[in-house]
Image (tube, helix red, strand yellow):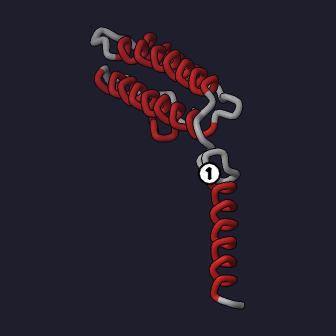
C-alpha cells in the first residue's frame, strides 16, 4: 500500500472509531450520560422532594419543643415512618439525587427526635431512631 492509501485508511478508521464512540458515549448514547433529564421527571422529583421535606421540617419543629411529652414524641416518630419516597418511573440519576437529599433530611429529623427522647429521659422504643443510618426510604 502506498503512502496515500495508508493515510486514507488511517483517516477512515479514526472517523469510524470517533463515530462509534459518539454513538455509545454521546449526549443520547447507549452508555453515555444520556443528555438532559426529561423536564417532567425533574418537576416530579422536585415536587415530591419539596412536599416531603416540608413534612419533615414540620416534624423537626415540633420535636424541638422543650415541653414535648412521650405521647407527642411517639406520634411524631410514627409520622416520620410514614413519610416515604415514592418512586418515579424512569427517574434515573436525577431522582436518585433528589431521593438522597430527602433521606439526608429524614435522617437529620430522626436524630432530632432521638435527641428529644434523650433530653426528656424517655426510652426510645422505635428502631428507626436507634440507628438513623439505616433509614433508606
**Quadrant in the rendering for residue 44:** top right
109 or 48, which is in the foreground?
48
Q: What residue is rendered at 58% in x and 36% in y?
A: 36
Residue 117 position within the rendered picture, expressed as x and y whole percent measured from the top left = 36, 23
**Would residue 17 appear left or right of 130 to someone viewing this image?**
right
Which residue in the rendered view is the most extreme toward the top? Answer: 67
Reading the image, the residue beneath label 1 is 26
Residue 69 percent across, percent down from the top left? 37, 11
Direction from residue 45 to residue 118 in the image, left or right: left
Q: In the figure, 83 relative to 93: above or below?
A: above
- Residue 107, x across and y down, in percent: 44, 32
Q: Which residue is rendered at x = 58% and y = 40% of the image?
A: 93
Residue at x 34%, y 22% (from the top left corner): 116
Residue 115 in sight here: yes
Pick the front one: 46 or 55: 46
**Which residue appears at 63% of the width and 23% of the height?**
40
Q: Is residue 127 visible?
A: no
The residue carrying pointer 1 sits among few (fewer than 14), some (14 to 19) or many (20 or more) residues within 10 Å by Cα, namely: some
Tell me the quadrant of the picture where the C terminus can be found.
Answer: top right
Closer to us: 72 or 34: 34
Would you identify the image quadrant in which residue 87 lies? top right
Using residue 95 as the reference point, say whether residue 73 is left or right of it. Answer: left
Q: Secondary structure at mark 1?
A: loop
In this rendering, the answer to whether 129 lies above or below 74 is below
Amino acid at each position: 500500500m502506498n503512502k496515500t492509501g495508508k493515510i486514507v485508511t488511517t483517516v477512515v478508521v479514526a472517523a469510524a472509531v470517533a463515530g462509534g464512540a459518539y454513538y455509545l458515549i454521546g449526549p443520547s448514547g447507549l452508555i453515555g450520560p444520556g443528555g438532559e433529564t426529561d423536564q417532567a421527571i425533574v418537576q416530579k422529583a422536585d415536587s415530591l422532594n419539596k412536599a416531603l421535606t416540608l413534612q419533615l421540617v414540620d416534624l423537626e419543629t415540633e420535636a424541638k419543643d422543650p415541653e414535648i411529652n412521650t405521647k407527642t414524641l411517639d406520634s411524631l416518630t410514627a409520622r416520620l415512618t410514614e413519610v416515604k419516597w415514592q418512586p418515579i418511573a424512569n427517574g434515573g440519576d436525577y431522582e436518585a439525587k433528589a431521593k438522597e437529599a430527602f433521606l439526608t433530611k429524614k435522617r437529620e429529623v430522626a436524630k432530632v427526635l432521638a435527641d428529644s427522647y434523650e433530653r426528656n429521659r424517655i426510652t426510645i422504643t422505635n428502631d428507626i431512631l436507634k440507628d438513623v443510618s439505616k433509614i433508606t426510604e
